[in-house]
Image (cartoon, helix red, strand yellow):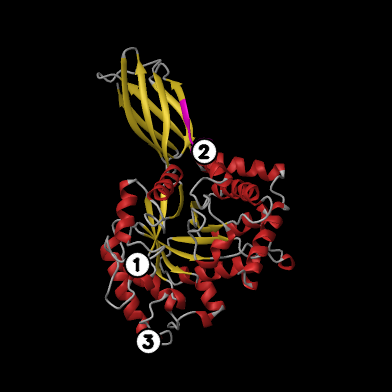
Amino acid sequence: MMTKRTLLLLLSGIFCLQVFAQTSWNDPAEIKRVENNIEKYRKGDAEITIVDKSGKPVSNASVVIQQQTHEFLFGSNIFVLHQLATPELNRKYESAFTHLFNFATIPFYWRELEPQQNHLRFEEGSDSIWRRPPPDELVKWCKAHGIVIKGHQLLYVKRKFMPDWISANDSSKLKALAGKRMAQLAERYGNDVTIWDAVNEEMARIAKPSQWDAVPHDFLSWAFKKADSLFPKTTQLLINDETKTSHYSTQNYVDMVQGLLQQHIRVDGIGIQFHMLRPPKFLDGEIYTPAIMHHAYQELSKLGKPLWITEITIPTQGKNGLQDQATIVADIYKLWFSEPQMKGITWWNLGDGTAFGAENNFHGGLLDSAMNPKPSYKVLDQLINHDWKTNITVKTDDNGKANFRGFHGKYSIRVKKGNKSQKYSFQLQSNKKVSKTTFKL
């Protein structure tokens, strides 16, 4: 039976799609701005020199350049790996993931990882809990598939995600317990999980404290300081929150992060959630237009930290829901990919029926419940694996040089001259004005 709340959620999702479709995403000037930014910030120049064994340049050699991976991180959470109803569904889920993504968010919710005090669920073979597979199993799978891992999250003190054995009102003990938890995670996963949401939804905690555990007044700054002391300096510690694109909520987030930075607290990145589960507020100007979204990211970028889109839900209700979702996905991914400070984008639930609770009513997956691709998945496949990948063939000049411009990432290079052929690996890096290398044929 559909409750009143569920009906309202469904209607709000439909309304979000309609509002988004009415905005100025087809403005030629906006399209040109996005295209120019992608060309400027996501691509780089490369110079490859081919020489023979004696070091002499090899001219007129054919150089086949094929991009293998992106430097930019495209991902999803992977909360239901190996947990679907049949082997075939699990196979399709894994295949869809690895075909599209190089980045995975794995769950570290305290409630399910330590359901009883000192009873930890890290190891493969631990008790099965839906959407909370043992982290060891997920880390092993990601490493086997060359996927960068983000942990979600070190601390999230919303009551329904906290263990029952921790008192909701005893803030005096929280630091000791949370410090022990972070130390366990750092020791076990510090080398494999290179990016973490250090804290989650602190703006929401401050706005609606009744839904959250009591915490010390310095909880946010303490959490980052503690994480900094425990994790390798190569680990990226993110703050993660849902900030709508209005000036008001963006400014609140800017103020929160700025407050940490002014205390010289290490914050390595700013996570931005994007769940389209509520209708935007017209009176506040909170409509998903490219101009408003771009302005929000500009304001956050002034803090000098990388930006990450960390959670995305776009529903598919309504007569044209599937196509509306695909249209929105195409537009916003282009905008996000064009933002110079953006480092990665994470869709939240890859398949329908794999979300949390009532969120399943939005059917916000890129795959349907049978794990078949929706139009939105196909749109991302076209962008990530075709439009935003470089595959070209060039010739070396008289000096043995071949120049090209391509998207940042790892490449395979095959050089052919006469009856000689050799394959090499090459990386086009965003931190270099021109990526140069010399290969011997």
The spot of residue 359 in percent (x, y) is 55, 64
Q: Nearer the viewer, residue 71 or 123?
A: 123
The spot of residue 16 in percent (x, y) is 67, 59
- Residue at 48 percent of width and 59 percent of height: 354
Q: Looking at numbered disc 3 in the image, what kind of residue is underneath it?
A: Ser
| Left or right relative to 135: residue 221 | right
At mark 2, the secondary structure is: loop
Q: Looking at numbered disc 2 in the image, what kind of residue is underneath it?
A: Trp
- The residue segment tinted magenta is 385-392
Q: Which label's residue is closer to the chain start, 1 or 3? A: 3
Mark number displayed over residue 228: 1
| Left or right relative to 315: residue 78 | left
Mark number displayed over residue 172: 3
Q: Nearer the viewer, residue 116 or 285?
A: 116
Labels 1 and 2 touching (C-beta < 8 A): no
Label 1 vs label 3, nearer the camera: 3
Q: CA distance from mark 3 to mark 2?
A: 51 Å
